[in-house]
Amino acid sequence: MHSEGISASGFAVTVESAADTTVVAVSGELDIATADRLTKALAGIEVEPDHLLAVDLSGVEFMDSTGLRLLIGANRRAGEAGYRFTVVTGGSPAKRVFELTKMDEYIDVVDELSDAH
């Protein structure tokens, strides 16, 4: 497990890998002030073709368009590299962002990791 730690804003990123799945768990506020930390975490992950990269936003309290743009880019890179990409929202406010922008029609957005495609 790799952890980026918690800042004064309460933002944290942790990375865990097991078998064919890597989960990047995010908590706190994902916005212009914190997105760079998630970008760096995602850039440091190598995912094998046909494996799954899941970004777990269930601990996110707020997400702005910067966070959405970051995840759209991660989804595009996954498609280019041949691995699966899923966003887990749970009951977080991030789910509403995906629904309002209709990006849940282009990105695999699920409530629980077990629902990933």
Image (cartoon, helix red, strand yellow):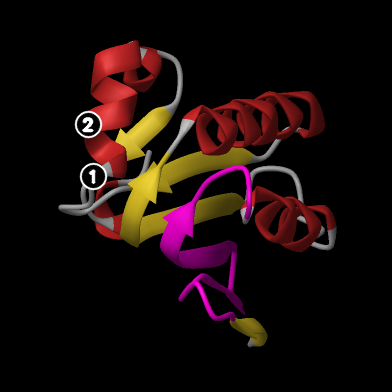
- Considering every residue shown, the one lying at the far left of the view is 91
Q: Nearer the viewer, residue 87 or 52?
A: 87
Q: Position of residue 87 (x, y in %)?
A: 42, 44
Residue 19 image point, x, y percent: 58, 73
| Residue placed most toward the observer, 5 or 54 | 5
Label total for image? 2
Contact between marks 1 and 2 (CB within 8 A): the answer is: yes
Quarter-wise, where is residue 74 in the image?
top right
Mark 1, other Cα within 10 Å: few <14 / some 14–19 / many ≥20: some
Give the magenta-colored segment's residue range: 7-33
Q: Is residue 20 magenta?
A: yes
Q: Which residue is mark 1?
A: 93
Would residue 51 be found to the left or right of residue 90 on screen? right
Residue 96 disc label: 2
Q: Amino acid at mark 1?
A: Pro
| Position of residue 85 in the picture relative to residue 83 (left or right) | left
Give the SS element for disc 2. Answer: helix
